[in-house]
Image (cartoon, grey):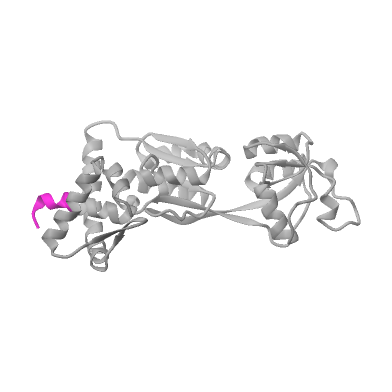
Amino acid sequence: MALHDLDHLRTFLTVQRTGSFTDAAALLGVSQPTVSAHVQALEAALGYPVLVRDRSGARVTTKGAALAREVAVHIDALDDIASLSVDAGGAPSAVHLGGPAELLTTLVLPRLPELLEAAGAPIHVTFGLAEPLLEELRTGSLDVVVSAVQPRVRGVEAAPLVDEEFVLVGAPAWHPRPGIDAPASLEHIPVVAYATNLPIVRRYWRTEFARRPDEVTTAAIVPDLRGVLAAVLAGAGMSVLPRYLVQDALDSGALVALHNPSVAPLNTVYLARRTGEGNRQGAVRSLSAALEHILG
């Protein structure tokens, strides 16, 4: 196979990882017809199909999957070397990190010097909800996403990073009524929630009490868990919050746990990247490793 066919292999590998000719074109910075032409030229040279178009985008054939396993490590290594060569000639490109504002602000950004040293490049941070951030990751706008939901996006790989523990908290004045079992003892306490459908509170009620929180009233909706914490500290009501946000307030007595389950509710946080990107981009690989060290 000629040396110029490396571009065809790179294009094929990108389509295989993203599952889409369109997304591969965007990531490679070429047109979709160019992607199609590269794949067709590769198939003509090999003498067998490597990809099949379907309703969801593109599906790799059995022989195509074997080819991808064989060439991925070599293509990724070449791209990594090329990236190092570019970096040596000028300022390194920024690495784009996305995740929930509360977690990144509380646990990650205080360690920013460590992350910058690991990445060897500027870090651009984007806050947001998991689904939009994962879509930006898939299409190339972000390089790494810390996701509070398990990614199920084609072209994105993810690994468990850390388990968040959730606590039902309120100001000391909201102690549950004595002699009454939860959740009945909590029904008089208004809720400060993250969203109108009470997603975190609802999950806690379902997990701990095997019922929905239909009896509770909502005091306020605050779409930032740090804002929810501020409202709860002010005595506005109760809420379910991650322990990393409330531990200091619990230690000082500014908040109390309104319920103490035998097994605390957990939510797994994932580290997500485009498939193969950790092998292909040294800065992404190093930033990912630093995040695993900080949060793992």
> Can residue 281 be seen by looking at this rendering?
no
What residue occupies the far left of the structure in this picture? 2
Where is residue 95? Give x, y as percent: 37, 39
- Residue under the image location 68 percent in, 58 percent down: 264
Against 202, residue 116 (above or below) is above
- Residue under the image location 30 percent in, 46 percent down: 22
Where is residue 278? Give x, y as percent: 34, 51
What residue occupies the far top of the structure in this picture? 90
- The quadrant holding residue 45 is bottom left
Quadrant, the N terminus: bottom left
Where is residue 199? Give x, y as percent: 65, 48
Front residue of this view, candidates 200 and 261: 200
Left or right relative to 125: residue 285: left
Left or right relative to 106: residue 74: left
User: Which segment did they paint magenta?
Assistant: 1-8
What residue occupies the far bottom of the structure in this picture? 62
Left or right relative to 250: residue 178: right
What residue occupies the far front of the structure in this picture? 55
- Residue under the image location 79 percent in, 40 percent down: 171
Is residue 250 inside the magenta stretch?
A: no
